Image: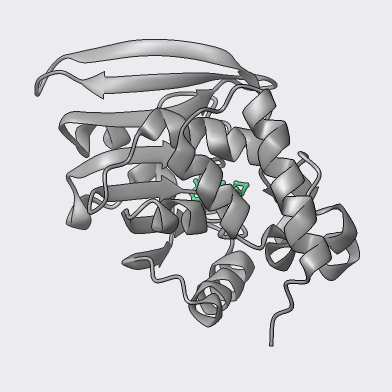
């Protein structure tokens, strides 16, 4: 039903080379990018461009993140197979698929119903089995499934959603782009129930993490 041609596979290996040259070292992350047919996560009109290292529009005025950004966040998360990982912003499901390839038990939240529905079916058709896809507000996290080993936010957060910090295990990590127009990739490591180590990385650009419509 889904086509993954030799040409597309070839372009995908070029993309892996590009993001390796940009500094991604984690072999498992590079393997995941090399395996996942990104063109299938996009609107067919952009299919020819799927293996460029760029973000592209998806439904509901959202974007599929740039592969380098997906790889950068995935590398920071440093996932061990079996870990419970919460993703905020399912979008196209591409990052979700990367997390599945890394062996994570993935819980993901999306606030656009159209994307939630479409991506849920698509990931299933493609054989990716996240533990739980939720239609709801990522600011709140998923307290009923907490605590998580890792949390990744894939939309630009104007301020830090405090509830997400509270849903991390001690020793767990939150990776979140923080800022309004431009975001600084930021990592919070939970040292104890009350202490967090914060580390900042470079600048990135994401669509905004939005407050609920209600
Ligand atoms: N990981 C996705 C990124 C999509 S863009 C991908 O690679 O395709 C960010 C996504 O976050 C969008 O789909 C947007 O609808 C969603 N989003 C924004 N604010 C949100 C919120 N408060 N809760 C859950 N999802 C949110």
| Residue nearest the viewer, comparing 131 with 18 | 18
Q: Where is 113 relative to 103, above or below? A: below
The percent position of residue 169, horizontal first and vertical second, equals 15, 36
Q: Extreme bottom residue here?
A: 1
Give the residue at x 63% y 30%.
20
The percent position of residue 100, horizontal first and vertical second, equals 41, 58
The percent position of residue 8, horizontal first and vertical second, equals 79, 62
Give the residue at x 26% y 21%.
189
Color style of the picture: one colour
Q: Can residue 207 be seen in this view?
A: no
| Residue nearest the viewer, comparing 96 with 25 | 25
Location of residue 42 by image quarter: bottom right
| Residue nearest the viewer, comparing 154 with 212 | 154
Quarter placement of the N terminus: bottom right
The percent position of residue 91, horizontal first and vertical second, equals 59, 56
Q: Where is 99 relative to 174, above or below? A: below
| Residue nearest the viewer, comparing 109 with 12 | 12
Q: Is residue 104 visible?
A: yes
Give the residue at x 31% y 36%.
164
Tag count: 0
Q: Where is 76 relative to 64, above or below? A: above
- The reply, left or right, for residue 168 in relation to residue 73 is left
- The reply, left or right, for residue 79 in relation to residue 154 is left
Give the residue at x 42% y 28%.
76
């Amino acid at each position: 039903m889904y086509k993954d041609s030799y040409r597309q596979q070839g372009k995908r290996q070029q993309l892996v080379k590009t993001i390796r040259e940009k500094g991604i070292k984690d072999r498992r992350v590079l393997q995941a990018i090399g395996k996942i047919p990104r063109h299938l996560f996009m609107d067919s009109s952009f299919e020819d461009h799927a293996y460029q290292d760029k973000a592209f529009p998806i439904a509901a005025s959202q974007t599929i993140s740039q592969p380098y950004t997906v790889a950068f966040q995935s590398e920071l998360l440093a996932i061990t197979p079996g870990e419970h990982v919460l993703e905020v912003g399912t979008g196209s499901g591409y990052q979700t698929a990367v997390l599945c390839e890394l062996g994570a038990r993935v819980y993901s939240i999306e606030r656009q119903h159209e994307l939630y529905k479409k991506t849920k079916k698509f990931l299933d058709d493609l054989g990716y089995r996240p533990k739980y896809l939720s239609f709801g507000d990522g600011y709140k996290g998923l307290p009923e499934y907490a605590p998580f080993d890792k949390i990744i936010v894939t939309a630009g957060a104007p301020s830090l959603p405090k509830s997400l910090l509270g849903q991390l295990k001690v020793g767990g990590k939150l990776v979140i782009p923080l800022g309004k127009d431009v975001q600084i990739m930021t990592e919070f490591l939970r040292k104890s129930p009350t202490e967090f180590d914060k580390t900042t990385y470079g600048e990135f650009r994401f669509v905004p993490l939005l407050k609920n419509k209600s």
